[in-house]
Image: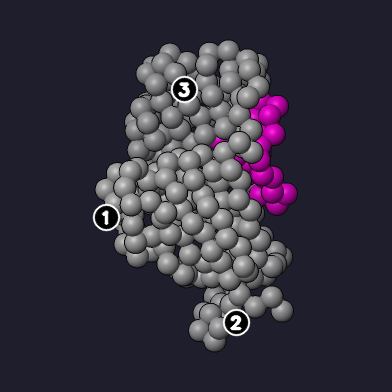
Amino acid sequence: MNQSIKLEALMQPRTIERILAGVPTSDGAGVKLTRVLTQNLQQRLDPFLMLDNFRSDDPGDYLAGFPDHPHRGFETVTYMIAGRMRHRDSAGNEGLLQNGGVQWMTAGRGVIHSELPEQENGVMEGFQLWLNLPARRKMIPAWYRDIPRPEIPEYATDEGVVVRVIAGTSNGVAGAMHRKDTEPLYLDIDLPADSLFSTVFPATYNAFVYVYRGELTIGGTQLAESRMAILANTPQADGVVLISSGPAKAILVAGKPLGETIVQHGPFVMNTRDEIFQAIKDFNEGHLADTR
């Protein structure tokens, strides 16, 4: 870990546009989770399509996992804070996602995969983020990468804030992943009491903060635990400042919008209804994950 990183100076930090609570739901074979970024927010938070937060110490909430299911047209980013999840997919990839690791999967033209817990007790906690692909890349071959915890760059500030850079670059520290079209920034930020954290990113990016422990203040507005703040797209805004009074943990996600039409039907995200119908047809006929 790099120590005592000097924070980049901000001239016009962003404020909070609105605060949202997630929607309790279940997915897969009945895994209980909170859907934080819902479908009605996709255009506002383009290029991000969905964010799920799962957190439970009750095995009944997660043991059934996510059996075989398809995707087409976007990327999934699964960040495991605690627990163990086994990934297998139709491209022959297999990996074990565990404490502090990230699974980055490009569905592209199509993939069928499963994510099944490899634990019978204990805490299962993490996030799954859906990141859109531009129209010209929606039908690229599927791709997958496991990123274990030691491969995710971390840095600490003079005030003891510890930041994990999953994607993008923050305060001069390059993250584990980079994406040319959407340029995502994905940070996991651990703030001690009475600390401040700031990072720079362009005014043109859409961005949000989700607090999963404690509470934070952004632009004078308090953000409670299990709440998401959509950050205002103020012209000339150059980043965000997070302030903690007590210990807090949050993820910060920002990215370059694609500005394209979004058409979603369940696990398929394309640009037109015809493309959705084709995805359904390909899946029903067993061709979704063809590499041809």
Q: Looking at the picture, which amino acid does disc 2 mark?
A: His
Image quarter in which the C terminus is found: bottom right
User: Does the image show residue 239?
Assistant: no
Work out how far the residue at label 2 is from the one at label 1, CA to CA, in angstroms. 34 Å
Cβ–Cβ below 8 Å for labels 2 and 3?
no
Element at badge 3?
A: strand
What is the basis of the colouring in this image? one colour
Q: Is residue 171 left or right of residue 231?
A: right
**Mark earlier in primary sequence (1, 3):** 1
Q: Nearer the viewer, residue 79 or 242?
A: 79
Element at badge 1?
A: helix
User: Residue 60 got which mark?
Assistant: 1
Work out how far the residue at label 1 is from the one at label 3, CA to CA, in angstroms. 31 Å
- In the image, residue 187 lies at what x, y percent? 56, 35
Q: Name the residue beneath numbered marker 3.
A: 191
Which residue is found at the position 46% from the left and 53% from the top? 85
In the displayed structure, 201 sits above or below 194; it is below
Q: Nearer the viewer, residue 1 or 132?
A: 1
Range of magenta residues:
166-187
- In the image, residue 22 lies at what x, y percent? 35, 47
**Mark earlier in primary sequence (2, 1):** 1
User: Does the image show residue 166?
Assistant: yes
**Mark earlier in primary sequence (2, 3):** 3
